[in-house]
Amino acid sequence: LSDVAAMGAAPAGFVLGLVCPDDADRNYWDAFLSGMAELAASHDVPLVGGDLSRGDKIAVSVTVWGAPGPSSRFLTRGTGAPGDILVTVGDLGLARVGLAVLEKHGRAALADWPAATAAHLAPVPRLAEGLSLAGLPGVTSCMDVSDGLARDLPRLLPQGLGADLFFPPGGLHPEVTAHAAGHGRPPEKVAFFGGEDYALLATVAPPALAALRAAVPAARPIGAVTAKPGCTLNGAPINERGFDHFG
């Protein structure tokens, strides 16, 4: 759903493929499918087919498709330009904090870190915001941040371009700031490397920024696209690439 949102589309339906071991716990499947059904119903996305197979391990394959919204336009990657403003919709680094505190404290973390644990356990696809972004001609590209900004930002930018990023003090979620302070880390690096955010990351031509912020109040400028490759974070070069599924 988040990938569909990042293209400025409305989800239309999904198919589900499952491989099920003979000894799989029935309670597991009840919880898995009820959670999926709740999320699908909340966005009016019907399950219209799929496939079932027996196997020695659980495997899940979900395919969601969508259609353009009122703008009749899809958003894509790689179409920003130097000088475009980078904006995000959603909190960066919050899900990473949620994972860290859940791993350390278990379910006790739910009370002390409510926003971070919710961001990790129940991320919200930004479907309405994606449709709004697609309706603004000044928005030049978009994707969702799932592997972390460090990994996903280069995927958004055209080859050969870079970015100057700036996270001002107080510009991040308080739980990100608090967790970073408690572990001696700069909060902007927690935001830069965090994954599973499912925030939207877009580029917008500067004259359209005011219209974007009026249409999507949750949008926050975080920097600008540069004509030279590479990335700076609060003025300092940063070269780490972030999370890699196969690294």
Image: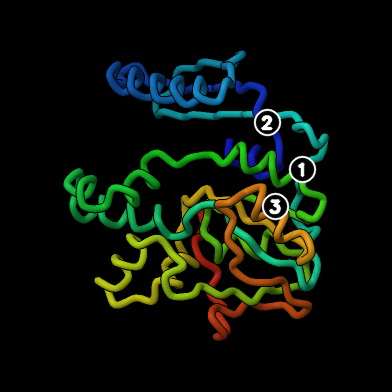
Callout 3: 10 Å neighbours few (<14), some, many (20+)?
Answer: many
Q: Is residue 29 left or right of residue 217?
A: left
Q: Is residue 162 left or right of residue 171?
A: right
Instruction: Identify the residue at image location x=76%, y=54%.
Output: 139
- Tell me how far mark 2 sits from mark 3, CA to CA: 15 Å
Q: Nearer the viewer, mark 1 or mark 3?
A: 1
Instruction: Identify the residue at image location x=67%, y=56%.
Output: 202
Instruction: Identify the residue at image location x=70%, y=74%.
Output: 162
Q: Amino acid at mark 3?
A: Cys
Question: SS of the residue at dot 3?
Answer: strand
In the rendered image, which quarter is residue 49 located in? Answer: top right
Q: Earlier in the sequence, mark 1 or mark 2?
A: 2
Contact between labelled residues 3 and 2, with CB atoms less than 8 Å apart: no
Farthest bottom residue? 236
Q: Quadrant of the N terminus?
A: top right
Q: Which mark is residue 135?
A: 1
Q: Which mark is residue 142?
A: 3
Q: Position of residue 188 (x, y in %)?
A: 45, 72
Callout 1: 10 Å neighbours few (<14), some, many (20+)?
Answer: many
Q: Which residue has dot 2 on it?
A: 10
